[in-house]
Structure formats: structure tokens, C-alpha cells
Image: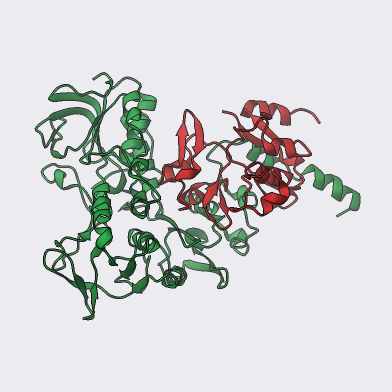
């Protein structure tokens, strides 16, 4: 299954991916206007820090997603091997945030519904917003095997 | 025993898998079986006339943000395309574990090789004088919700008996649509099964700010009125005029149909870690089951949606021959009222020298965090406001991780999945996580610090 992978060695913690993701999920797609949107657009990828490294929290597209099990509203479902988030059904109970072991689902500011990576399916360029924005090409979208080949390439 | 196109033809039917119940557990089991066994017959029997629906959305349905047609979590098409025989509006009146069949209330007999009992639970009705009057309702089924909706136009004041999740949710949504709401709760604070006094206090304040009256350490002594409820008399003598009383005092597993069988029941249907009852072909999952509790190691009934889904999946795997053990249920709760989120898991009301409480609170931001440690392992936690680490704490709890090394930082905002990753086992394979673990420092760190030193 194709999903987002991150090469930690390359991550500088610049958060360009966060800005790009939030913009991609805004109404205006313009950075100045987006700040004034309500609800405030929220990134689905989140950079957290550890000693000497950064880690972008991404959805792992689990085989047996705990978030789907937890969703009481039928907003998070698994259809044909894909995890789909139907925002209109979300009631903001946050059961999914409690369930996800990898902190992949985001709480939003002044807005009950949650945010989860949708792999930019609607995007015209065919590449994820975070993938394109990353200046060190740390974010990769593809199969596990392809990613492992890339990171094992001699530098 | 072949899979059907959804049309049941005869009075006597034989299925490899029969499932009593069409909610979280029933659907999870049926789906999992079908993923692994594409051919055998699966029957799902429900005493309700509806497609599988999200029971927890009933308060939203009453409030109006969800319409009745939005409630189902699976379409009619789902049953047809999965080859699942859906039998609606029928009650099981008899189960013969010897002959491996069950009898419905219309005399139909269904033979099975494997049976899952996922009949859920029903609201506990307290023995109060007048409890059988019109206008006294639970909030568990669509039928309950529709009865409430029918009454609402003539309702000014609602009394909610019970301050748990169902009670407070009902109160919250009824308050939102302009009804006067009073919550009557026996405990010293609302949500006593979910959180401690301080966090309950944060929620109570929000409710009271929004004109919901909360009467603690109070019970209802009598329900007054002719055929319809007119008022309730409290145990302190006070009377409250009301036109609707919602009873939300917990639920009791549905298992009366087992009384003439040898299936072992206690406070629920007793199951082992394979979700099997004492009868090999009979399994149970969800609100009706009393299964393995992760923290205590004992059997306990847990009435929670995610638990039902997981238990049913384990039952399904064992039914198709894939031996799997249930990791154990953990009490889980989460809600948001008036923009204030609260999640909790595990235990929080225990005392003793092996327990330690870590607390952090901000009175201004309605933020409060508490972790209960037992021998330096997370036994429970409550988060109010900022809940972003809820999943991480739950992982640490489930994996019984020793947190002594980061006890001092664990409640900080900056504590995160990456800092805890060395102490956690990945249950889902992730090349990115492995890359993180094997990378000692990021390139930028290496380059930058090699230039400036240190």
C-alpha cells in the first residue's frame, strides 16, 4: 500500500511541509487569506523534536487501523484497503486521537472535527503537498520497498 | 451453506457462521469473517428493524445535526455484496448448544457451526415508583430517540438521571436545542466513571455556564404524574417539574436468552481471550461480553464501541481457524463539550504505595493532565483541553512500558511520540520509524554542529 514515508536523516525541522499541508487544506489556498479562515486550516503532518533529530508524524495507514475501530460516527472507515476520513460525519469526540498510537490525527483549534492525512488525492499535480514543499526531499510517497531502496542507497 | 445474495428462502436455514447482533461487534465480526472466508454462509440476526447504525450518534440525531438516514454505518448494499444474510426485527428465543441451532420468535430455526453472541446491552432501569410512565426513556436505540423526538415539541424541562457519558451527552445536545436541562447524579461529581473530581469540575463549570443545572449526590425518589410524567421528586424532598426524564444509569448485558443453556454468564457472558464461551462453538463480543481486562488481568464487562469492534474481530479470526488472543480491554472514554475536549483511559481511582499521580493543570486554559502510575507504569490518565498525547499515553499503558526514565517530562507539551519511540514497540511495521531509530542524528544536526562544535 502506498503511504507517506519520511527519511529522518534529511529532516531539518523547517516545517515547510506543515505550511504546505495546511495551505492545501485551506479554502483560499493563499497563505495570507488562510490565516483568517474559520476554521483555521490545520496541517495533517506534524514535526516533533527528539534529541538531535526531528520526526514528521505521518499516518501509517495501518492494516488494522485503531482509529477506524474507535470512530463512533462512521467518519473513519477502511474501504478497499484505504483509510478514508469523511469529515462531514465527524462529531469531534476525539476517540480516534486517543486510539492512534502514532499521534497521526490532529486536534484542531476552535473546531471540533479532527484532521487526518488524505494523501492529497484531490491534488492536480499528482504529488503530495508536503512531498513537494520539502526542501531536502525527505518526504516520500510510495511503497515500503521503494522507500527502503531509496534510504539504503549510498549517499 | 453457500454464501447467499441476501435473500433468505426457507424456514430452516443452515449457516457456517451465525451472528446475533447487528451493531459494532456484529458487523466487525461479519466483515472479518468475509475477508477470510469468501464462500461460507453468514447470517446476522437483529431484533431491531434497522441497518447497522452508530448508536453513539443518537444524541446528535435528536439535536438535528444527523438525519435518520445518516445513522447507518453500513448500507443495504454492504450486506448484499458481502453475501451476508441480514435477518431484521427478530428475537432469538432459544439456543440449543447441543444441536447447534437457535430459534427465532417466528419459529424459524437457524443451524450454525459457529455462533457469535453480540447482543449488546440495555439501559438499566432503576426501581423507582412511576418509572413506567410515559416520558421516561432510555437513550440506546433509534426507537428511544424517536420517542424522545416525538415528545420534544411539548417539552420545556428535561431531567437526566445519571451523570455518565450518555447522560451528559444527552444533556449537552438537549441544552443546545434550547431545552432546560437538569442532571441528577448520585456521585459527588458528573462523569465519575470517567474522570476525577477536578476534571469533572472543569466540565461541570462549562455546563453550568451554559445553563445546565447539575444536582450531585442526589437521586430520584419518585416519578410523578398520571400516565405521563409531570415531575420528579428527589430524595431531598425537592420536586422538579419536567416533561421528559432520560434514564442514563448504565447498561446491563443482554443475555436472558441464555438462562436455559449451559453458557457461563456472570455480569456478562464470560469469554476467554479467544472470545470463546465455555461452549466451544459459541463466542461472545462487545457490550454483552465479560472479557479479559488488560490492566487487571481479570474478566470484566466493558461497554465501549472500540472494544466491541476489536473483540469481535478476534472472535472472527478464531472462528475461521486463525488462533488469536485478545490483548485485553482498557476502559476508554472521550468527549468534547463546548469546545473543551476530555479523554481518559484505564484507572484513576486507586490508592496505595505502588501508585503515584503526576498532575499538571492550568486553570485559565481549562487544561488539566493527570497520569496515574503503578510501579512506574501508566495505569490510567485523564487529559482535558490539550489531548494531543492521548494516543501516546495509551500506547505506553497498553505496552506496560516503564516510564521512570521520563517521568519528569511525560506531561510536558514537548513530550512526544519521537522522544518516547525508543521505549515503544512498533505494532505496525514502519520503515520511517526504523529509519528514525537507526539514525543517531539528522544530517543537518551533524553538519551544523560539526562546524560550530559541541
Residue A79, above or below B172: above
Report x, y in % for residue B236: 23, 80
Report x, y in % for residue B133: 14, 62
Q: Nearer the viewer, residue B235 or B130?
A: B130
Count numbered badges in the picture. Answer: 0
Is B106 placed left or right of B39 in the picture?
Answer: left
> Can residue B289 be seen in this snapshot?
no
Is B128 placed left or right of B399 in the picture?
Answer: left
Report x, y in % for residue B365: 57, 68
Q: Quadrant of residue A75?
A: top left
Residue that appears at 22% across and 41% down: B48
Residue B290, above or below B178: above
Residue that appears at 27% across and 41% down: B118
Residue that appears at 78% across and 39% down: A135
> Can residue B253 be seen in this snapshot?
yes
Residue sitting farthest toward the bottom? B237
Residue B108, above or below B262: above
Q: How is the image coloured?
A: by chain
Residue sitting farthest toward the left? B107
Report x, y in % for residue B303: 32, 52
Q: Nearer the viewer, residue B155 or B320?
A: B155
Q: Quadrant of residue B25?
A: top left
Q: Quadrant of residue B5?
A: top left
Q: Quadrant of the C terminus of chain A?
A: top right
Is B316 placed left or right of B93 in the picture?
Answer: right
Question: Which colour is chain A painted?
Answer: red
Q: Nearer the viewer, residue B60 or B29?
A: B60
Q: Which chain is green?
A: B
Q: Quadrant of the N terminus of chain A?
A: top right
Is A155 placed left or right of B357 in the picture?
Answer: right
Residue sitting farthest toward the right? B451
Q: Nearer the viewer, residue B348 or B151?
A: B151
Amino acid at each position: 500500500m502506498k503511504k507517506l514515508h519520511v527519511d529522518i536523516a534529511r529532516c531539518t525541522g523547517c516545517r515547510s511541509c506543515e505550511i504546505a499541508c495546511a495551505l492545501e487544506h485551506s479554502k483560499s489556498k493563499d497563505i495570507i487569506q488562510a490565516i483568517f479562515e474559520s476554521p483555521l486550516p490545520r496541517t495533517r503532518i506534524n514535526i516533533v523534536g527528539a534529541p538531535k533529530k526531528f520526526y514528521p508524524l505521518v499516518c501509517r495507514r495501518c492494516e488494522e487501523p485503531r482509529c477506524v475501530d474507535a470512530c463512533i460516527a462512521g467518519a473513519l472507515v477502511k474501504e478497499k484497503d484505504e483509510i478514508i476520513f469523511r469529515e462531514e460525519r465527524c462529531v469531534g469526540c476525539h476517540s480516534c486521537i486517543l486510539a492512534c498510537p502514532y499521534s497521526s490525527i490532529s486536534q484542531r483549534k476552535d473546531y471540533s472535527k479532527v484532521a487526518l492525512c488524505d494523501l492529497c488525492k484531490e491534488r492536480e499535480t499528482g504529488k503530495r503537498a508536503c512531498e513537494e514543499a520539502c526542501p531536502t526531499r525527505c518526504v516520500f510517497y510510495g511503497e515500503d520497498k521503494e522507500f527502503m531502496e531509496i534510504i539504503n542507497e549510498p549517499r | 451453506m453457500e454464501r447467499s445474495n441476501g435473500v433468505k428462502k426457507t424456514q430452516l436455514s443452515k449457516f457456517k457462521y451465525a451472528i446475533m447482533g447487528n451493531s459494532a461487534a456484529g458487523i466487525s465480526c461479519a466483515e472479518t469473517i468475509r475477508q477470510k472466508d469468501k464462500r461460507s454462509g453468514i447470517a446476522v440476526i437483529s431484533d431491531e428493524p434497522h441497518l447497522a447504525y452508530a448508536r453513539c450518534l443518537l444524541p446528535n440525531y435528536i439535536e438535528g445535526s444527523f438525519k435518520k438516514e445518516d445513522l447507518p454505518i453500513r448500507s443495504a448494499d454492504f450486506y448484499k455484496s458481502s453475501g451476508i444474510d441480514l435477518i431484521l426485527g427478530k428475537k432469538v428465543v432459544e439456543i440449543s448448544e447441543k444441536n447447534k441451532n437457535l430459534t427465532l420468535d417466528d419459529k424459524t430455526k437457524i443451524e450454525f457451526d459457529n455462533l457469535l453472541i453480540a447482543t449488546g446491552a440495555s439501559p438499566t432501569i432503576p426501581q423507582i415508583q412511576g418509572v413506567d410512565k410515559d416520558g421516561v426513556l432510555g437513550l440506546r436505540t433509534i426507537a428511544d430517540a424517536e420517542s424522545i423526538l416525538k415528545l420534544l415539541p411539548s417539552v420545556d424541562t428535561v431531567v437526566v438521571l445519571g451523570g455518565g457519558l450518555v447522560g451528559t451527552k444527552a444533556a449537552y445536545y438537549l441544552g443546545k436545542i434550547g431545552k432546560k436541562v437538569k442532571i441528577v447524579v448520585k456521585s459527588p461529581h458528573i462523569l465519575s466513571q470517567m474522570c476525577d473530581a477536578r476534571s469533572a469540575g472543569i466540565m461541570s463549570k462549562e455546563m453550568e455556564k451554559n445553563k445546565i443545572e447539575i444536582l450531585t449526590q442526589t437521586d430520584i425518589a419518585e416519578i410523578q404524574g398520571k400516565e405521563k410524567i409531570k415531575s420528579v421528586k428527589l430524595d431531598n424532598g425537592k420536586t422538579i417539574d419536567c416533561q421528559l426524564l432520560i434514564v442514563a444509569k448504565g447498561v446491563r448485558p443482554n443475555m436472558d436468552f441464555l438462562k436455559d443453556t449451559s453458557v457461563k454468564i456472570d455480569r456478562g457472558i464470560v469469554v476467554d481471550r479467544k472470545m470463546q464461551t465455555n461452549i466451544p462453538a459459541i463466542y461472545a463480543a462487545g457490550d454483552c461480553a465479560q472479557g479479559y481486562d488488560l490492566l487487571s488481568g481479570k474478566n470484566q464487562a466493558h461497554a465501549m464501541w472500540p472494544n466491541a469492534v476489536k473483540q469481535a474481530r478476534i472472535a472472527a479470526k478464531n472462528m475461521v481457524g486463525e488462533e488469536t488472543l485478545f490483548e485485553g480491554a482498557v476502559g476508554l472514554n472521550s468527549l468534547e463539550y463546548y469546545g473543551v475536549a476530555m479523554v481518559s483511559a484505564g484507572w484513576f481511582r486507586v490508592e496505595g504505595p505502588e501508585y503515584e499521580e503526576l498532575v499538571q493543570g492550568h486553570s485559565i486554559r481549562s487544561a488539566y493532565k493527570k497520569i496515574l502510575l503503578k510501579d512506574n507504569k501508566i495505569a490510567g490518565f485523564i487529559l482535558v483541553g490539550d489531548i494531543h498525547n492521548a494516543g501516546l499515553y495509551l500506547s505506553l499503558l497498553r505496552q506496560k512500558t516503564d516510564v521512570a526514565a521520563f517521568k519528569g517530562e511525560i506531561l510536558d507539551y514537548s513530550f512526544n511520540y519521537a522522544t518516547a519511540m525508543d521505549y515503544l514497540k512498533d505494532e505496525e511495521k514502519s520503515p520511517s520509524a526504523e529509519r528514525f531509530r537507526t539514525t543517531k542524528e539528522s544530517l543537518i544536526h551533524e553538519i551544523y554542529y560539526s562546524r560550530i562544535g559541541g
